[in-house]
Image: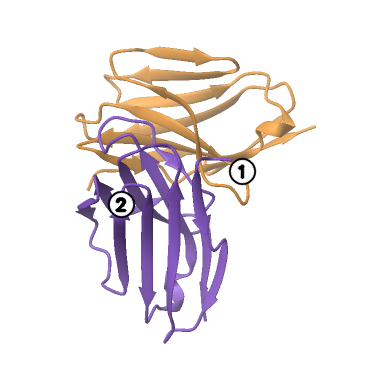
Amino acid sequence: QQQVKQSPQSLIVQKGGISIINCAYENTAFDYFPWYQQFPGKGPALLIAIRPDVSEKKEGRFTISFNKSAKQFSLHIMDSQPGDSATYFCAALVRRQLTFGSGTQLTVLP
Amino acid sequence: ETGVTQTPRHLVMGMTNKKSLKCEQHLGHNAMYWYKQSAKKPLELMFVYNFKEQTENNSVPSRFSPECPNSSHLFLHLHTLQPEDSALYLCASSRDSGRNTIYFGEGSWLTVV
């Protein structure tokens, strides 16, 4: 079964710190890796995404790092803010099907 | 406003009831999806429709019956559900079912009693 393994399950970071969430996959056919952000009571919203031919993508305070040989990718949130407190899901796409990680609940303390 | 609207937002139903969840997308997309989100589990894809045709059914029990009358509307008909079916049901859409951004609605919280 295609799987995407996400860690940690929960993360607590001080305001201004760096939040790092990691994902690993097994299927080398995955060809698109989005990250979604979900606030309580809301549906997931696309945050940032990367394709495997790129090693890093940055949008504002959010950066995806992609290591194709290790089959790993990670989300870095710089200068984390209390408003970033949410659940983050990594995902991977192959053959028109998006497989999600189990989610990371991020809490940024003021 | 996400562009994908789901109703009802909350639903409580008995195991012998029949109810339906409704989804409407205002984004001009051609693909629509139903996902199930349970506590501490990954989002589970249930069904995919592309240009009104069902292209994926991830071994979902027959007590869940989807309907896609057009590219803008998607229903999930519920019948004789079990308590373990209680979850957040998310509708989503994308331009097509290929490598495109998926946009989610805010979900319908279902409680089966």
Residue carrying label 2: B70
Q: Residue at x 52, y 44 (%)?
A: A9
Labels 1 and 2 share a subunit = no
Q: Residue at x 24, y 45 (%)?
A: B50
Image: A81 above or below B110: above
Residue carrying label 1: A39
Judge left or right: residue A90 versus residue B57: right
Judge left or right: residue B47 versus residue A22: left
Alpha carbon of mark 1 to alpha carbon of mark 2: how far?
A: 30 Å
Q: Colour of chain A?
A: orange
**Which image quadrant is residue A27 in?**
top left
Residues A3 and B63: in front is B63
Name the amino acid type tagged 2.
Asn
Q: Residue at x 42, y 51 (%)?
A: B91
Report crowding for label 2: few under 14, some 14 to 19, many 20 or more residues within 10 A (C-alpha): some
Which x, y percent locates residue A75? 49, 25
